[in-house]
Amino acid sequence: MLAGNTIDRVLAHLYADAQTAQLAFEKGEVDSCGVSIPELERFQRLPHSTIVRLPNGTCRFLAANTTKPEFADKRFRQAVAYAIDRPTITKALFKDMFIPIYGPFVQSWAKNPDDNQYPYNPEKAKALLREIGWNASRVVEIVYYYTDAISKSLMETIQQMLVAVGVKTSLRLVPDDPPWEKEVYNEATYDLAFAAQGVPLDPDQATALIDSRKIYPNGVNYSRYKNPRVDQLLDAGRAAAVQSERQKIYQEIDKILNEDLPYIWLWEPAAVTAINKRVVGMAERQAALPNTPPLNEIHKWWIAS
């Protein structure tokens, strides 16, 4: 609602599905809505639409079952990282909306600037596999639980890239809990698992994946990764009160995990939002303060004449 050009109320409309909300935005009935990747280009063409790409506070990865001898050597996991062409995938499937990551943290201050970004290098991947004497007849199964069409295409693309460097793969959709929990968390019978972890506000939220004390049944460290130095640093990062101290700690963790790769971190998905250009300040404040509630600094918004 308006009082002059200022905003005195915000009305939240709840819709049964995303398509109905998006149609309301197209008609000008609402001023903001979420946009899926398949619908992105259509919303970019709308004359009244500003597209804002925000980190959504999760990381996507391929988890390696480190309890299996074939995957215990970090050089195998590094080979997988070099075999995946992230720039091509993010452009073709995600319209450059997803943000590549190379370690467990999505907070910029916790990332180590010296991380290896594992640029697409099939020859490097093949060399690492030769070093470890990889058995080219071994079929590596990748399990995943996402049922959307883009995820299916993504899995097939990764499969092709791994086959190209000499790693035969098969794909299998495993329904989310309880089958996923039983196979991946509890019994660790999988080879590689494509999944996600939320790390929205603080790097400490990534500890569920990398703390050796959070292996089932104590948590969801389903790669079964164990590193006493990482455990020690996680405790120190949780206890430190000064941001500069925490930064040093988490950047050390990030560097270790970037080398060990119990999870081959891939990218951080984006929360893509369309905002009506008549609402001044909304897009700017969202971009300035990501990973926060959608009504970010609403007192700084106003309606254009």
Image (spheres, rainbow, N blue to C red):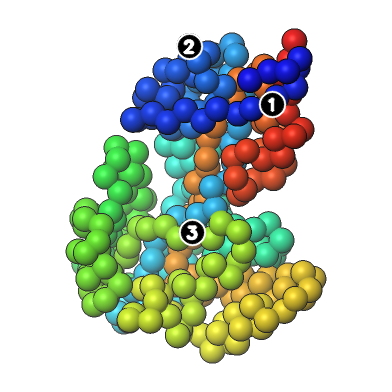
Q: CA distance from mark 3 to mark 2?
A: 34 Å
Residue indicated by mark 2:
27
Residue type of the residue flagged with mark 2: Lys
Numbered label attached to residue 208: none
Q: CA distance from mark 3 to mark 1?
A: 34 Å
Locate residue 207, reporting x and y percent: 52, 73
Identify which residue, 231 or 189, lies in the foreground. Answer: 231
Q: Amino acid at mark 3?
A: Gly
How many residues crowd mark 2 within 10 Å: few (<14), some (14–19), many (20+)?
Answer: few
Q: Looking at this view, is 143 or 24 the one in front?
A: 24
Above-or-below relation of 13 to 238 = above
Q: Quadrant of the C terminus?
A: top right
Foreground tag (2 vs 1): 1
**Label disc, if present, on residue 198 of the rendered structure:** 3
Q: Which residue is mark 1?
A: 8
Element at label 3: strand
**Residue at 45 percent of width and 83 percent of height:** 212
